[in-house]
Image (spheres, grey):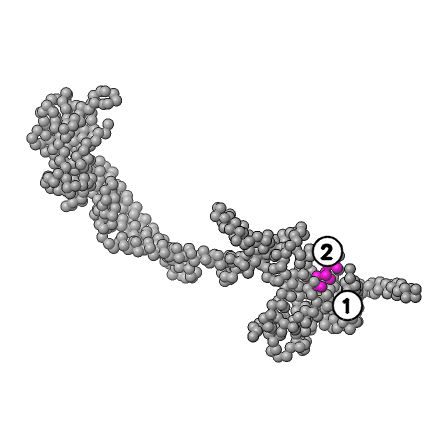
Amino acid sequence: MNKTISIHLQGFPFILEEQAYTVLENYLNELRQVLQYEEGVDEIIQDIELRIVELLQETQKGGQVIQLERIQFIMSVLGDASNFGESVLESEAEKTTHPETATTKRFFRDRENAVLGGVASGVSAYFDVDVVIVRALFVLCFMAFGSGIPVYILFWIITPAAKTASEKLQMRGKAVNVEGIKTEVKEAADRVQQNSKKWAKHVRSELNNKEGLQRFIHAFRRFLGIAMLFFGITLTLVLCFFLFIDPNWVPAQINGQFTSLGMLFSIFFEDDGTHQLLIYGIAILGFAWAFSSILAALRLLFSFQSLWIKWSLSLLGFSVAIGIVMLSYAGVKTARSYAYEGELSQEVARIQQEELQLQTVSLHANKSYDGFTAKETHFERLIVRNGRIYNHGIEIVCEASSDSLFHIVLIKKANGYGVEKANQRASHIQYPLKWSHKHLELPTYLSYPLADKMRDQEVVIKIRVPEGKNVRLNQAQIFPRVSEVLNLEQEEAHGFIDSDGSYSCWD
Amino acid sequence: MNVENTQSQMRKGILEYCILSILHQGEAYPSEILDKLRQAQLLVVEGTVYPLLTRLKNLELLTYRWEESNAGPPRKYYCITPKGQQFYLALERTWRELQQAVTQLTKTNTYE
């Protein structure tokens, strides 16, 4: 059983056995190779093909399959390819510098053993090295700043693939001479010209996937497309998750304290829509990113281009603009609410004592202290409960008094958009310090309404200390404080009380 | 150097002259030229003729025209140009001289 191939030779149809076809094709390719230096190769080949048609028609009877023997006979009539070449060499004696092509080793791409374009296998055939070594070298070059990639592509473009039997032999030929290299260079230049035209056409039409680079680009596009699709879908899912679940379930962190995203938002952003604006702004930006990624992926994967993609892209661009405006508005509005500082100062006590005893009252002590109740074991620095924020960091300032009394001044500070708003916030701060049994009880938290938001609310307790008298906090003397370095009494002492009741000095 | 090679070289050397001579008698298409050459037993393989025809055509010694054929593919009828005529006449003169010289020489040889 034999496969047949139907061909057209100079416009005349013939049916050939596969073997006969291969032999004929190789013969014609060899002729072309041998005659390549002759002026008007195409014309000569055309004449020869016409002659072959004549010879085939002499014996062929309607639709008869042409067999190998017939082709071999025709080849014997026309003569071996070398005969054609000889006449050229002989008649142009002054130009006999052409190399004997059959013995010259030339560099071809070996498509039969190719992974991409067959450059590596061509190199291995040329230098007679194992192809694995050549590939490994190429891969190493790829990794070294990608320098191998342009080299490979250059070889790919300028090197012809070994198509015919004689070319395949030349690919592995033994002799190398200067002439061979010269013609190689000349041909390479021609090929670059030809190939660049061809490539331009390919890139424009994107039709021919057979060429290796095209295949490579195709694979890369596919990979990129899948990655972007995956990213887009993941981002969409994540955004949906964050948008539609209660933000109070989303963990977040502030001052080393774990809380929820919803809590964080409600602590910082006003309830008058700023909060929502921020969330929706982020969501819009996120979705725009996700969808444009998905669209780009679809374009890469299926390479379709339609009007609605353009529309979607412009719509996404518009959404990004809106998202940015929303975020900027929320951001500016929030920043402006820190613009002015308000301060309320009030002398809450005058005490005549030999020594002022301060006692911190912690929430964890499980004391019900003007509504303060908290977990027993944690010294949380920020607590939001019952519509109020409880924050740590009570500042204590000790300075000299002008009379013989301890003066206790309570200063409440807050920021706001406008002095009035700042003062209003300051007045909302609760700090219930209390005098009981010869000592002053200091809570470890100040509190203010959640509706006021966190706007640098602070409490400073200023203690004016008469000369020669001491201040003790939880039994430890905090004023006057002897500087360890200068051995001098300092006129002022700054410190703050942490949520667990411990005192830290700032000086 | 073997005999066959020399013989083939000798034949090829005068092939150009012979082709011009055939076309001098009137136009012909390649197969006709080949037949005539084959009859004269001057032809070893057909392949050598085609590059020669094209080369002579490129030198403007020959020209051709296409003619449809009922029997097969279109035929390329070659004919000789005025420049080709001159070229042919020059070759002919040389050939006559050569022929004479060679005949004379070979005759002397046979009589010896």
Front-lying residue, B81 or A430? A430
- Foreground mark, 2 or 1, reads 2
Horizontal and vertical percent position of residue A469: 13, 22
Quadrant that contains the N terminus of chain A: bottom right
Percent x, y of residue A238: 30, 54
| Residue A97, position as x, y percentages in the image | 71, 54
> Dividing the picture into quarters, in which one does residue A436 lie?
top left
Q: Residue sitting at 11 percent across and 41 percent down?
A: A371
Residue B80 is inside the magenta segment: no
Chain identifier of the residue bearing label 2 in the image: A
Is A84 one of the magenta-colored residues? Answer: yes
Q: Quadrant of the C terminus of chain A?
A: top left
Farthest residue to the left: give it. A437
Q: Residues within 10 Å of mark 2 (few under 14, many from 20)?
A: few
Q: Which residues are magenta?
A: A83-90
The answer to whether residue A336 is left or right of residue B71 is left
Q: Which residue is mark 2?
A: A96
Taking the view exactly as shown, the residue that stands out farthest to the bottom is: A62
Mainly helix, strand or loop, the magenta region?
A: helix
| Picture disc at residue A215 | none
